[in-house]
Amino acid sequence: MEPFSDVFPIAARVVGMDKGQAIFRNGDVADAVYRVIEGEVQLVRRTPDGSEIILQRAGEGDFFAEASIFTTRYHCDAICTRPGTYLHVPSETLRLRLLNDPGFAMEWIASLSRSLRKQRAAQERLALKSLRKRVVHYLVDCGEDGRVTLDQPVIRWAAELGASHEALYRTLAEMEKDGVLQRQGQTLILLQQQVGLPV
């Protein structure tokens, strides 16, 4: 993956990040856009009751905080959930590059389109009332032939699905019992005869 550091050779900088580290907090001045080089960052918003809503999981190659080129403050927290490195690009530098380099601008639009598709799928998933349907949606959308190997703990996946980890464990057990799901360690397999059928 090209880290884009050569696209912004002076202004951009590569920064290390540790698990649990906040890249920025809700309300901080929005002065940069970021790209994960290695590791993972989650964009999180907290509700008045203290629970978390995961807005985005940014992994290798993903940009995050793209909207900061048009806003003055960040509207969520960016928390490192897997250690690694990220690219820090000042917003003004990015705006100038987009204005002056059509090729780069097209690549940026393509990246935003991929991110938008992922976010739309995540929102569609959260709108489903049944946790079982959210699990099926995730496996169909994010997997290959209904097979997904989780790259995060179940407690984190539960938050992404808008549920408690207890509820998710219970739902997965029920799906296994009903013959809808097969589990092999971190790999979840949606049985073929169930794909596309109401569950």
Image: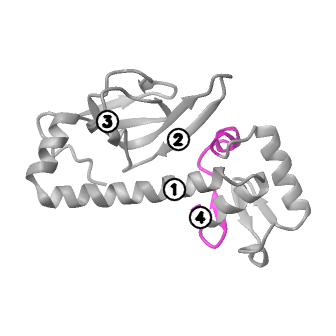
Range covered by the magenta-colored residues: 141-160
- Crowding around mark 2 (Cα neighbors within 10 Å: few <14, some 14 to 19, many 20+) is some
Rendered image: mark on residue 68:
3
Distance from label 1 to label 2 (Cα)? 11 Å
Q: Please tell me which of labels 2 and 4 falls first in the chain.
A: 2
The mark nearer the N terminus, 1 or 2, is: 2
Q: Is residue 65 left or right of residue 150?
A: left
Residue 121 percent across, percent down from the top left? 55, 58
- 3 or 2: tag closer to the N-terminus: 2
Residue 141 badge: 4
Task: Left or right? Give the position of 8 relative to 62.
Answer: left
Can you tell which of label 4 and label 3 is closer to the viewer?
3
Seen at 26% across and 55% down, the residue is 108
Q: Which structural element holds mark 1? A: helix
* Three-letter code for the amino acid on which mark 4 is drawn: Asp
Residue pictured at 65% horizontal, 50% vertical: 126
Quadrant of the rendered structure where residue 35 is? top left
Q: Name the residue rendered at 57%, 52% in the picture.
A: 122
Q: Which residue is mark 1?
A: 120
Q: Which residue is mark 2?
A: 55
Check disc 1 and give the amino acid type.
Arg
Question: Where 181 falls versus 33 (above or below)?
Answer: below
Residue type beneath disc 3: Ser
Precedes in sequence: disc 1 or disc 3:
3
Instruction: Name the spot of residue 191 as percent of width and height, x first.
Output: 77, 72
Label 4 to label 3: alpha-carbon separation: 28 Å
